[in-house]
Image (spheres, rainbow, N blue to C red):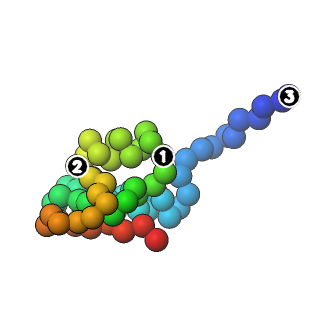
Amino acid sequence: MEIIVAEHAGFCFGVEKAIQAAEKAARREPVFSLGPLLHNKQETARLKKLGIIEKDELMEKGAVLIRT
């Protein structure tokens, strides 16, 4: 079987935009994501280190990101 590796890899425009918005908000205040912001374990872990916290329900004050 031949494996062809893509020349470019990364997130789609919408995911990239959501990540940028989350990072920008996290510089100003706590950020909570209602559920995971995206389905990529490595990126989710990196965002958690930046202070973007995934929750199942929200009770804290801060910016809230909701996936659509």
Place residue 30 in its image quadrant: bottom left
Q: CA distance from mark 3 to mark 1?
A: 27 Å
> From what the image shows, is residue 25 above or below residue 39?
below
Place residue 29 in its image quadrant: bottom left
Callout 2: 10 Å neighbours few (<14), some, many (20+)?
Answer: some
User: Disc 3 designates what residue?
Assistant: 1
Q: Amino acid at mark 2?
A: Gly
User: Disc 2 designates what residue?
Assistant: 51
Mark 2 and 3 residues: CB-CB less than 8 Å, in contact? no
Callout 1: 10 Å neighbours few (<14), some, many (20+)?
Answer: few
Residue shown at 50%/64% (left/top)?
A: 14
Mark 3 and 1 residues: CB-CB less than 8 Å, in contact? no
Q: CA distance from mark 2 to mark 1?
A: 17 Å
65 relative position to 31: left or right: right
User: Disc 1 designates what residue?
Assistant: 40
- Residue 56 shows up from this direction: yes
Q: Nearer the viewer, residue 33 or 56?
A: 56
40 relative position to 3: left or right: left
Q: Amino acid at mark 1?
A: Asn
